[in-house]
Image (cartoon, coloured by chain):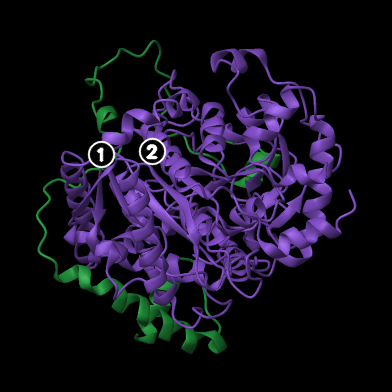
Chain colours: A green, B purple
């Protein structure tokens, strides 16, 4: 497996491998990828891939627009102040 | 009194209810023997105190609901991936070391409300990711039948604790066979219910669409008693769907009606190229036993079986990469003193790099890979399609047969370290058991006897989704016809002889 791909995955997953463990990890990870690779070649046509569990609960209620009892309004120019402002100033 | 520890839970409970045994004394005896044998088997990450704060009389409401036929006043072990209030829960991972939940999982709460005692928290492969308990973040568990061999996994601690007389029953978790495979390798019963029948509230998530809480026990009746406690609708789990009035113990009495049932043997899972010859031989013996009990045994085909493992590992890893993203050491578990020279990302990284073990990192990276742009269609969506097709094929088979049959594990318990050099050799252990998780059907592993080398072998039965009670009844029918009963491993029997109560 290419080093840059492994590093990219580590970055996405918030992980890091030390130089010492990199080689062994890359070799074993390549074995795993080879193991799952066969699925790419399968010709499948199962239609929808919505979750299959809890079929009977997939039916959801109609969306209904509700009138809000009160709508809190903020001024359009409202901004949260900086930490310093919040601690010492008026915050707005 | 120590000989009581060899009995199945339902027989001990009858003695307690008859006033012949004091439940609290039994719990103390159980705890002391668990400690005595623990240096050999290492089933537990945490053992309870001798004065459990939760010991109580069964709550009347629960007992009345089940006509008193519930598991009650019995020492129970709980897999360390299930939250227990005031008792450390680490999911077998260093990243959660020191975490003590402020709440009980629903299944644990119900067990306590029924008056049962928690013996301790059992060892597992970290976050349930493994098939041998060697990937525990702490230490491996040993098989009570041969200490140089694995107990299976990931609920290896649960299975070994029940086999080694350290608890009468155990709560485990089963994402891809993690209750059934170790049960088979340790010679006990392992049950995975239909998805949603036991609440997952308080079960630390690994792969949410595949995760189940399951039960390890010495006999099917013990499983049914436990189901009567824990299989209940739960508003705290949005996927909970347990029938509110099912009685799993009463269902066992109807096993006679199943003598005309039809069992389909999945021929791809009896393939001599995949399975040990001794496993196949003992499975064929079991089929003869079922046949002589009157059950009709036929051979069926499920060609998708050969693609199940890749599909399972893609789906489970994808879900794990998302579920395990939450562990950063900020709110709970492993943490380091704040270092102001590091930004937040570096602090997260430090915790995750030191807290996760090798296999967990591998699955997080695999999940990240199969979900990443350019690969999701080829891997993740293909795996989801396959899952749907398998579920449809299994449903089709169940229109022709009442139960499906296979071995539980393709191999006998293997030596510690034997499969650690190649992760895919470990994944191959799950070939028979992932089917039930992918197809969302209940499944049970039952002892089928011992190999020539004195190692247990298990058979697996599966039923249509929701027919858990009927599956347990068939399990009981087999158990009765086979007349094996629970067997104490010789090493444990010797330890019991040496034990001074």
Q: Residue at x 72, y 65 (%)?
A: B491
x%, y% of residue B52? 81, 36
| Residue A11 visible to the viewer | no
**Closest to the observer, B454 or A34:** B454
Rendered position, B49 above or below B115: below
Q: Residue at x 63, y 31 (%)?
A: B111
Q: Residue at x 53, y 37 (%)?
A: B223
Q: Residues within 10 Å of mark 1 (few under 14, many from 20)?
A: many
| Residue B68 visible to the viewer | yes
Residue at numbered disc 1? B402
Residue that protrudes farthest toward the front in the picture: B292
In the structure shown, which secondary structural element does the residue marked by tag 2 occupy? helix
> Are the numbered discs 2 and 1 placed on the same chain, yes or no?
yes
User: Which chain does the numbered disc 2 sit on?
Assistant: B
Check contact, mark 2 vs mark 1: CB within 8 A: yes
Q: Residue at x 50, y 42 (%)?
A: B213
Horizontal side of A33 relative to B199 (left or right) equals: left
> From mark 2 to mark 1, how far is it between C-alphas?
10 Å
**Closest to the observer, B346 or B470:** B470
x%, y% of residue B209? 37, 46
In the structure shown, which secondary structural element does the residue marked by tag 1 occupy? loop
x%, y% of residue B144? 65, 63
Horizontal side of B56 relative to B210 (left or right) equals: right
Residue at numbered disc 2? B474
Q: Quadrant of the N terminus of chain B?
A: top right
């Amino acid at each position: 497996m290419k080093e840059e791909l492994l590093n990219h995955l580590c970055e996405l997953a918030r992980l890091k491998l030390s130089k010492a463990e990199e080689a062994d990890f890359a070799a074993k990870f390549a074995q795993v990828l080879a193991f799952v690779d066969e699925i790419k070649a399968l010709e499948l046509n199962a239609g929808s891939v919505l979750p299959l569990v809890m079929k009977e609960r997939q039916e959801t209620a109609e969306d209904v627009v509700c009138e809000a009892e009160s709508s809190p309004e903020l001024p359009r120019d409202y901004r949260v102040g900086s930490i310093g402002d919040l601690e010492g100033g008026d915050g707005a | 009194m120590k000989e009581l520890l060899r009995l199945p839970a339902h027989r001990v409970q009858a003695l307690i209810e008859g006033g012949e045994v004091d439940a609290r004394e039994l719990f103390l005896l159980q705890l002391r023997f668990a400690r005595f044998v623990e240096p050999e088997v290492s089933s537990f990450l945490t053992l309870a105190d001798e004065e459990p704060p939760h010991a109580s009389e069964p709550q009347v409401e629960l007992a009345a609901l089940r006509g008193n036929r519930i598991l009650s006043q019995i020492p129970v072990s709980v897999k360390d991936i299930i939250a227990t209030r005031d008792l450390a829960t680490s999911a077998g991972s260093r990243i959660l070391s020191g975490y003590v939940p402020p709440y009980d999982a629903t299944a644990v709460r119900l067990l306590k409300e029924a008056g049962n005692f928690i013996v301790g928290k059992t060892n597992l492969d970290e976050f349930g990711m493994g098939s041998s308990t060697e990937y525990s973040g702490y230490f491996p568990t040993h098989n009570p039948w041969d200490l140089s061999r694995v107990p299976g996994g990931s609920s290896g601690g649960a299975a070994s604790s029940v086999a080694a007389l350290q608890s009468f029953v155990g709560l485990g978790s089963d994402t891809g066979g993690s209750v059934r495979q170790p049960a088979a390798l340790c010679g006990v019963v392992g049950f995975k219910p239909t998805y949603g029948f036991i609440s997952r509230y308080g079960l630390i998530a690994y792969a949410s669409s595949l995760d189940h809480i399951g039960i390890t026990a010495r006999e099917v009746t013990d499983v049914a008693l436990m189901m009567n406690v824990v299989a209940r609708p739960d508003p705290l789990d949005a996927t909970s769907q347990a029938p509110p009035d099912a009685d799993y113990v009463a269902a066992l009495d109807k096993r006679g009606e199943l003598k005309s049932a039809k069992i389909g043997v999945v021929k791809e899972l009896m393939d001599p190229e995949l399975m040990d010859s001794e496993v196949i031989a003992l499975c064929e013996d079991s089929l003869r036993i079922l046949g002589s009990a009157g059950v009709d045994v036929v051979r069926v085909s499920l060609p998708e079986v050969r693609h199940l493992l890749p599909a399972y590992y893609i789906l489970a890893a994808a879900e794990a990469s998302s579920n395990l993203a939450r562990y950063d050491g900020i709110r709970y578990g492993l943490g380091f003193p704040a270092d102001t020279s590091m930004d937040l990302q570096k602090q997260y990284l430090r915790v995750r790099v030191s807290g996760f073990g090798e296999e967990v990192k591998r699955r997080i990276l695999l999940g990240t890979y199969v979900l990443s742009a350019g690969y999701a269609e080829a891997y993740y969506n293909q795996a989801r399609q396959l899952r749907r097709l398998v579920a449809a094929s299994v449903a089709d088979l169940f229109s022709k047969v009442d139960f499906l049959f296979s071995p539980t594990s393709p191999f006998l318990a293997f030596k510690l370290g034997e499969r650690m050099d190649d992760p895919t050799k470990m994944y191959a252990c799950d070939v028979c058991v992932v089917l039930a998780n992918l197809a969302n059907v209940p499944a049970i592993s039952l002892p089928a006897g011992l190999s020539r080398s004195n190692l247990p072998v298990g058979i697996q039965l599966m039923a249509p989704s929701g027919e858990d009670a009927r599956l347990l009844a068939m399990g009981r029918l087999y158990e009765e016809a086979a007349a094996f009963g629970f067997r104490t491993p010789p090493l444990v029997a010797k330890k019991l002889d040496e034990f001074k109560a």
